[in-house]
Each structure stands twice: as C-alpha cells, then as structure tokens.
Amino acid sequence: MRRQTTSGDHPAGSGRAQRSDPPLMQLRFYAPDARADGCIRQVELNRKRVVLRRSLHGMRMAISMPVSDYVGIVRRSGGSDHTLVLAHRDPSLSIPLLVTADAGELDQAVRVWCVFFALPEILDERCDTQPPAPRRRRHNAVKWRHPRALMRRRGGGSLADMVVHRDEHEIIARD
C-alpha cells in the first residue's frame, strides 16, 4: 500500500517537513520520484547500502548500491525551504534526506549525515549532475579467455609450397 501524498512533494501527515534521522541502523522512508508510478519511491538506508524501490509503468524494481557510489551531501535552497540531499552522479538516484525552513537545523543535520555516511559535504551543486564516465576497456580483454597452449600454436604454412599431384589415380599407397 502506498502512502498518500499531497499535491506537492511532501508526504501528507503530521507535518510539512520531511526528516530522516541517521542514528537508526536501518532507515526506511518514502521520497518523491517524478518518473515513478504514483510519483513516490521507497528508500532504505543504512551505513553501507542504499536500496531504492519503485514501480515504473507497472514494473516493480529495486536498485541496491553501496553508499560509496554517492559523491556526498549537498545543500539546496529553494525559496524558504532548504533541502539536504544525498547526491549521486545520476540525478535520478539522488535522495532527499531533510526538507526544512530552519537553517540552524540544516547545519546540524549536515554534520550528522556526513559522519553517518563518511561522505564529504559538497558545496558545488553541479558536481552531482554530471553523468558517470564510461568504463575503460582493457587492452587485452580476450587474452585470458583462451588457453595458453592454443595461443602458442603455430599458424599453418603457405599453400604455395605444397606439392600438388594432378592426374594421379591414387594418393594413398597400398601394399
């Protein structure tokens, strides 16, 4: 069952502020996701892993990745609201951790989340919008796929040096 949301990005319920406290070992909450069905996804956080669960066009998916894939904690300001985000290079994988109007609360939360995840605070927001660099290919990717004995085999000789017997009846001698 999904949680009901208001017309905005914040879950309906006891208050407007979205807050997640890091001292819990396993933290599970709902976050807005513009591309998911129902515009909401479930996030599970712990010190080492992040699991995102959402439904896209009726197909359920779970994305599990280590916290080390994230680049850091970013502050974002929009009008009177301040947001604290666990930033990823792919913006669709970034996770909002706190939405508040109090700047003092935001400062305290930044320190707590940075220690909890052992990630730095990132001052430049543009760093999390760059796509990841493509993986480099190894030079000898196929080298280890074949046995060494086959790699040492000598190639065949040229056909020009072979003797050709034409107009012969039998090639194999019989006694």
Image: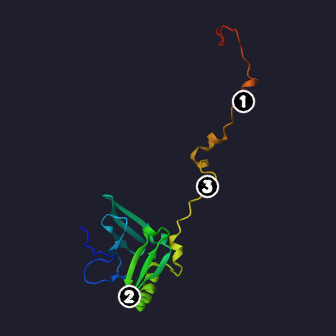
- Residue in front for this viewpoint, 35 or 84: 35
Lower position in the chain sequence, tag 1 or tag 2: 2
Residue displayed at 60% across by 55% down: 137
Name the amino acid, label 1. Answer: Gly
Compared to residue 60, the image places residue 83 above or below, namely below
Name the amino acid, label 3. Answer: Arg
Question: Which callout, 3 or 1, points to the residue nearer the camera?
Answer: 3
Q: Which residue is mark 3?
A: 138
Local packing at callout 3 (Cα closer than 10 Å; few below 14, some 14-19, many 20+) is few
Q: Are marks 3 and 1 in contact (CB under 8 Å)?
A: no
Quadrant (top left, top right, bottom left, bottom right) of the C terminus: top right
Local packing at callout 2 (Cα closer than 10 Å; few below 14, some 14-19, many 20+) is some
Residue displayed at 54% across by 74% down: 127
- Residue in front for this viewpoint, 2 or 152: 2
Name the amino acid, label 2. Answer: Ala
| Secondary structure state at the residue bearing disc 2 | loop
Q: Which residue is mark 1?
A: 157
Q: Are marks 1 and 2 in contact (CB under 8 Å)?
A: no
Q: Position of residue 29 (x, y in %)?
A: 32, 74
Q: Which residue is mark 2?
A: 101
Taking 49 as reference, is 160 left or right? right
Q: Position of residue 27 (x, y in %)?
A: 34, 76
- Residue in front for this viewpoint, 15 or 145: 15
